[in-house]
Amino acid sequence: MAIFAAMSELQVYNTLSRKLETFQPINAPFVGMYVCGPTVYSEVHIGNVRTFVSFDLIYRYLKFLGYKVRYVRNITDVGHLLDDSEEDKITRKARLENIEPMEVVQRYTVDFHQTMQAFNTLSPSIEPTATGHLIEQIDLIQRIVDSGLGYESNGSVYFDVQAYNEKEHYGILSGRNIEELISNTRDTDGQEDKRSPLDFAIWKKADPQHIMKWPSPWSVGFPGWHLECSAMSTKYLGTTFDIHGGGMDLKFPHHECEIAQAKAGYGHEPVKYWLHTNMLTFNGRKMAKSEGTGVTPRQLITGDHPLLSQAYDPMTIRFFMLQAHYRSTLDFSDEALQAADKGYRRLMQAIADLDTLQASQNSSLNVAELTDRVKAAMDDDFNSPIAIAHCFEAVKWVNLMKEGKESLNNTDLQSFRNFFKEFVAEVLGLTAASAGESVDKIDGLMQMLIDMRQQAKTARDFATADSIRDQLLELGFVIKDGKEGTTYTMK
Ligand code: AMP
Ligand code: ZN
């Protein structure tokens, strides 16, 4: 199966190491997948959500194909240094809000999980935290030092990029070379301690006022950001695993550094397939959490943003994201979301209508041909926009069948129904709009209370009947008895 045949960045990478035309897990049917998770110092923005929704689609499709996937997505709860500063993002937030760094971590981890649930992404199999894996990280630093590619300087430990590059190609993933990198470097952080400006910290000695710090053989300090992913992916997936993902912005330097660390520390190429999602922009503008230009999921879901005309259901936003290929840039705007909302509702209506279709004697449609096209699109580097376009052909069929213009026999109708219901719910991860679902639930609950009140009245228990009415009124529900029966409105 040629799932990854169209991955341009992989081809660049693999022409240098090995040729891969087809997806071959190292230990099929098991697949190991690691995705760089969020740094939990603020709410995620909708661009981050795009990356996690993309990997959710990939995870779901691999499971759909029958692979047993171990999906590891980390939580970065320490170690990201702000540009031009010695303070990490979590500590800065804690200082600004006058709370513990771990309170910051807890708050935004919970928030992240709620967001992921709203977008119907499946939980990863393991969600390790950087602070929970200090021992593994210190072990990896020691290995890198022992290999001769890490050196201690003033209590910090740096990766010797030039020495590494004498044996390996630093820049292999992002298609860079060291000469170009040296001429472009402007990094002055800890310059005096480093042998070369390209060297990156794998352990940083902490200033006395630094809050998040741990003992190590080199100093009381904290690990470099790139290190946690190497240590945790190896712990849970092995020294070489199948898929490593993240946003395009992580390709360099983060993933380049991961490759270097793993080769130095464990002596192996860490990853067989690298997958990178492209950036989501808003009205053409890049979104960056650190610059405060990120639109949050909350703003989209509540419509609380000056550039939005309405609130959008998370399922509409998910559908909008899946309508673009994960490697393409995607710009979202109010208009684009409105169009996506219509498309999403049309698709879900057809899925609901599937159950109402009646079988005929004969089939006028070729179900297998259509379902094969959907699968072929997904096999081609998870091409969800093409797969969705084919799903809309199914929507057309559903509508023609409703009008009696097309027909399916019993067997074909069953496979048509089963495939599209499963594909939309389990692979695309689209469910009925959550807002609509809550309204249905409230309706059901209200009907139950109205029935209970009626039963109390019939039993001449007017105290209970009145109490139900009064309590509902306090909650903002007005009960009205009319000729047609009892109804309710919301104040
Ligand atoms: P961070 O918390 O900044 O490390 O980001 C978490 C994930 O979101 C990483 O995989 C990033 O590459 C990804 N990401 C950041 N910004 C965007 C964006 N605008 N569009 C898509 N993915 C993004
Ligand atoms: Zn990472």
Image: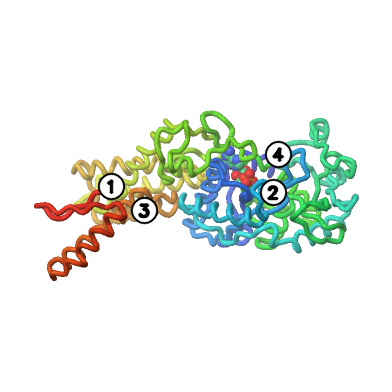
- Tag 3 and tag 1, C-beta contact below 8 Å: no
The alpha-carbon separation of the residues under discs 3 and 1 comes to: 43 Å
Identify the residue at image location x=80%, y=34%: 185
Q: Is residue 409 above or below residue 278?
A: below
Query: What residue does disc 3 label?
Result: 419
Tag 1: residue type? Lys
Along the viewing direction, whichever of 222 and 315 lies nearer the viewer: 222
Look at the numbered disc 1 and say if its residue's Cβ is closer than 8 Å to ligand 1. no
Q: How dense is the environment of label 2, judged by Cα within 10 Å: few (below 14), some, or many (20 and up)?
A: some
The alpha-carbon separation of the residues under discs 3 and 4 comes to: 39 Å
Query: What residue does disc 4 label?
Result: 174
Q: Earlier in the sequence, mark 4 or mark 1?
A: 4
Identify the residue at image location x=83%, y=55%: 144
Tag 3: residue type? Phe
Count of numbered circles on the image: 4
Q: Is residue 294 visible?
A: yes
Q: How dense is the environment of label 4, judged by Cα within 10 Å: few (below 14), some, or many (20 and up)?
A: some
Query: What residue does disc 1 label?
Result: 491
Nearer the observer, disc 4 or disc 1? Answer: 1
**Helix, strand or loop at disc 2?**
helix
Tag 4: residue type? Ser
The alpha-carbon separation of the residues under discs 2 and 1 comes to: 43 Å
Query: What residue does disc 2 label?
Result: 95
Nearer the observer, disc 3 or disc 2? Answer: 2
Along the viewing direction, whichever of 32 and 334 lies nearer the viewer: 334
Q: Could you tell me residue 80's position as x and y percent?
A: 71, 47
Along the viewing direction, whichever of 83 and 128 lies nearer the viewer: 83
- Tag 2 and tag 1, C-beta contact below 8 Å: no
Quadrant location of residue 239?
bottom right
